[in-house]
Image (cartoon, helix red, strand yellow):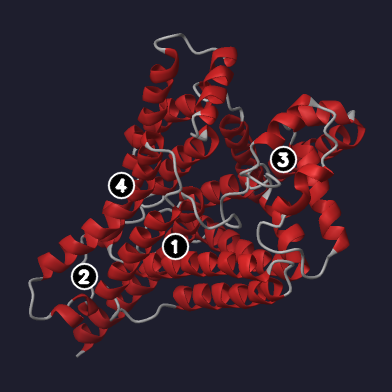
Amino acid sequence: MSNMHAVSDVAPPNWIAGRFEAQPKFSVLFVSGLVGAAMPLILALYWVAFGLAPESMGLPLRISMLGCALLLAGIWYRAPLSHAEVSLFRVLGLAAILWLIATLTATNRAHAFAGWIKMLLLFAICGCVARGLRHPSTARAFGLALLAGGIILAAFILLTYVRYLGFTMPTYKTARQFKGMAEMGGLPLNPIAFDAVFSYLAGLCLLPRSRPLILIGLPLFAICSVFTGSRAPLVILGASVFVLLCIHGLRNKSLLLRAGTALIAAIAAVGGSAVVLLAPDKEISAATEGRSHLWAVGLQKFSERPLFGWGYESWRDDLVSRLPGEYDLTFDLAKNMGGGYHNEYVSVFAEEGLIGAFAALLIICLLFRSSWLLTFRKWGASQSYDWPLFVCIFLLLRANFEVPGLFGYAQGPDDYLAYIFVAIVLSRFSVEEDYARRLTRAGAVGVS
């Protein structure tokens, strides 16, 4: 997590001056840090504003985030393109083309095209933020703002709980009651809880390793789980820790530890598969809170149009009519269908088909490979990058239960945070390239 400390004491690269040669460098750095800090806070305050006046705020959010991103890109536009940025632009560009093909074959082309434009804006914001986070002070301000955003949202959940239920001790029953009351008032607690947790985790990827910062996460995770009646944050957290431990165990030099880890991973995989295949449908529905029926409908629709899919948000056409409707959980879920199939991967297959699924795979591979390399390679500008791989696993596992994220509907804070994390990961490679470039220049000056 000490991404920035090794480069923060090195003089900023020469390209900082560039466009602002006539202005003091401090003003440039101040504006860059201010804009960088504003973006995570906008995402957090979005939910606060939404809670005060529940209505569609997608357009103001989109305009403010895009405006900040473009301003950040304008400040650092003279920075030479890094290899990491080139890779990012290539993957996002190819994904955009593939999704455009699926869009042009959608059952509702106008609606699908609107969704594609939203996704393009997310891609643009991701690229702009990745360039801005190359600067240490901007990255530090961005990371602190992400942590602050998580804390703001956790506090907002607490205050909302007190508003609805007073100072009643939270139990699972009262938390579920609170969740239902909040949803009736138009306030979706699941996305807010995820944004709080993920904003905090993404912020750790930009800040030096610090025990107090890690300890902040304990009450934050507790609030986002206990007070929302949602088991997902803790379950996904536990699964992410298990996967990360398995990865480290399989890479360990001890043959005995590698064998033991492989055995545990195999037992977990086989046992999980057996439970899914052998458990009664009603139990699976209860365990997934009705999501299993949504997944089944999504896969059924994929089988009907496997190549190009049905198009952006096509679940609105017939999802409810295709549901079995025989369980209370399914019925309750069908009443609040904002999450569609409640699975990003199923949504991609059903809405964009194999074409869109290949585009999604490109993004996943870029993100996972980059996070993996940050964790297991030795770097010059930073002593360690411990958090990106864990956060990447957390994000990819969470995609099995909710839609907003990397492949959501590009209109809520969840979607923006997902691509901000992609920008964070790729920016760390650019930081290493800038550091190596400065060392090369310093060596050349020394030789001359």
> Mark on residue 54?
none
Element carrying mark 3: helix
Count of marks overlaid on the render = 4
Going from N to C along the chain, the mark reached first, 2 or 1, is 2
Residue type, numbered disc 1? Ala
Identify the residue at horizontal 64%, vertical 48% (top origin). 399
Going from N to C along the chain, the mark reached first, 3 or 1, is 3
Identify the residue at horizontal 46%, vertical 52% (top origin). 417
Identify the residue at horizontal 7%, vertical 80% (top origin). 22
Label 4 crowding class (10 Å Cα cut-off): few <14, some 14-19, many 20+? Answer: many
Residue type, numbered disc 2? Pro
Q: CA distance from mark 3 to mark 2?
A: 44 Å
Q: Which residue is mark 1?
A: 423
The picture places residue 65, in percent across and down from the top left corner, at 36, 59
In the image, 282: left or right of 43? right
Going from N to C along the chain, the mark reached first, 2 or 4, is 2
Can residue 351 be seen here? The reply is: yes
In the image, 101: left or right of 447? right
Question: Splitting the image into 4 quarters, where does residue 359 fall?
Answer: bottom right
Question: Splitting the image into 4 quarters, where does residue 156 fall?
Answer: top left
> Mark on residue 261?
3
Looking at this rendering, what residue extends furthest in the bottom direction? 448
> Mark on residue 12?
2
Q: Which residue is mark 4?
A: 145
Identify the residue at horizontal 36%, vertical 46% (top origin). 146
Residue type, numbered disc 4? Ala
Front position among marks 2 and 1: 1
Q: Are marks 3 and 2 in contact (CB under 8 Å)?
A: no
